[in-house]
């Protein structure tokens, strides 16, 4: 054990220094064990990895973009009135185009061109059709119209299924079915046919 003479000034200084060194060692040990000298956490990493904090740090002028709006663009839907108008035009066009009489081979075109766009009229009048002897005449018995799914909000496509009757040159008749896929666009405020395709039959 150390012997100190408290009456001597040098011994008192030695005692003070000894107590100071002991407290310093204990303090440093506590700090080291608690990780006080470790590097501070990277705030940029911790903030960016926390969505809640990151959202609060975004400037108020920056709009929040949700995954729903980012993955799918909102497409305006036509009103029921506009859909019905285009549906009626598609039906009238298909029925007029289907109806044919070999005695007046261009009458089907004159009737159906009322529903066509100007560009389509110019195209179709160069291709006036001539049907075979087993389809000397064609008449509409009934028709139904179904909507075809597509992504263009300015365009409508309808499937017009016509149950018709074909008459041969000798006068015999037989039933037939033709399906028209009719594409329409609104031109100058009116729905006009811009294209069509015929299946389940032939000209």
Image (cartoon, rainbow, N blue to C red):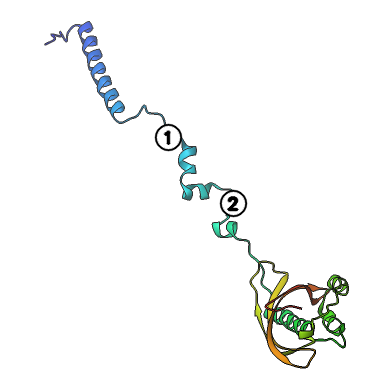
Q: Position of residue 194 (x, y in %)?
A: 79, 72
Q: Is residue 142 visible?
A: no
102 and 2: which is toward the camera: 102
**Pointers 2 and 1 in contact (C-beta within 8 Å):** no
**Which residue is disc 2 drawn over?**
60
Query: Is disc 1 placed on a helix, strand or loop?
Result: loop
Question: Where, by quadrant of the figure, is residue 200 drawn?
Answer: bottom right
Position of 201 relative to 47 (above/below): below
Q: Which mark is residue 52?
A: none
2 vs 1, front mark: 1
Seen at 52% across and 50% down, the residue is: 55
Q: Nearer the viewer, residue 67 or 83?
A: 83
Residue pointed to by mark 1:
41
On the rendered structure, is 99 left or right of 1?
Answer: right
54 versus 96 height, above or below: above
Left or right for 155, reference 119: left
Image quadrant in which the C terminus is located:
bottom right
Quarter-of-image position of residue 202: bottom right
Percent of width and height locating residue 145: 67, 82
Q: Position of residue 98 (x, y in %)?
A: 77, 83
Going 42% across and 34% down the picture, which residue do you hit?
Answer: 41
* Residue sitting at the far left: 1
């Amino acid at each position: 054990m150390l012997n100190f003479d408290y009456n001597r000034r040098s011994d008192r200084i030695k005692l003070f220094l000894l107590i100071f060194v002991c407290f310093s060692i204990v303090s440093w040990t506590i700090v080291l064990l608690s990780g006080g000298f470790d590097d501070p956490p990277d705030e940029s990493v911790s903030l960016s990895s926390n969505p809640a904090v990151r959202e609060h740090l975004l400037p108020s002028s920056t709009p929040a973009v949700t995954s729903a709006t980012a993955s799918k663009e909102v497409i305006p839907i036509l009103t029921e009135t506009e859909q019905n108008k285009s549906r009626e035009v598609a039906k009238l066009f298909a029925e007029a185009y289907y109806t044919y009489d070999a005695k007046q081979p261009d009458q089907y075109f004159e009737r159906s061109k009322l529903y066509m766009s100007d560009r389509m009229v110019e195209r179709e009048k160069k291709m006036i059709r001539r049907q075979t002897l087993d389809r000397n005449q064609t008449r509409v018995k009934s028709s139904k119209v179904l909507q075809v799914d597509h992504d263009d909000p300015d365009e409508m496509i309808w499937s017009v299924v016509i149950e018709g009757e074909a008459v041969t040159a000798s006068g015999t008749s037989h039933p037939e079915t033709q399906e028209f896929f009719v594409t329409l666009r609104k031109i100058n405020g009116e729905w006009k046919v811009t294209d069509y395709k015929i299946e389940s039959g032939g000209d």
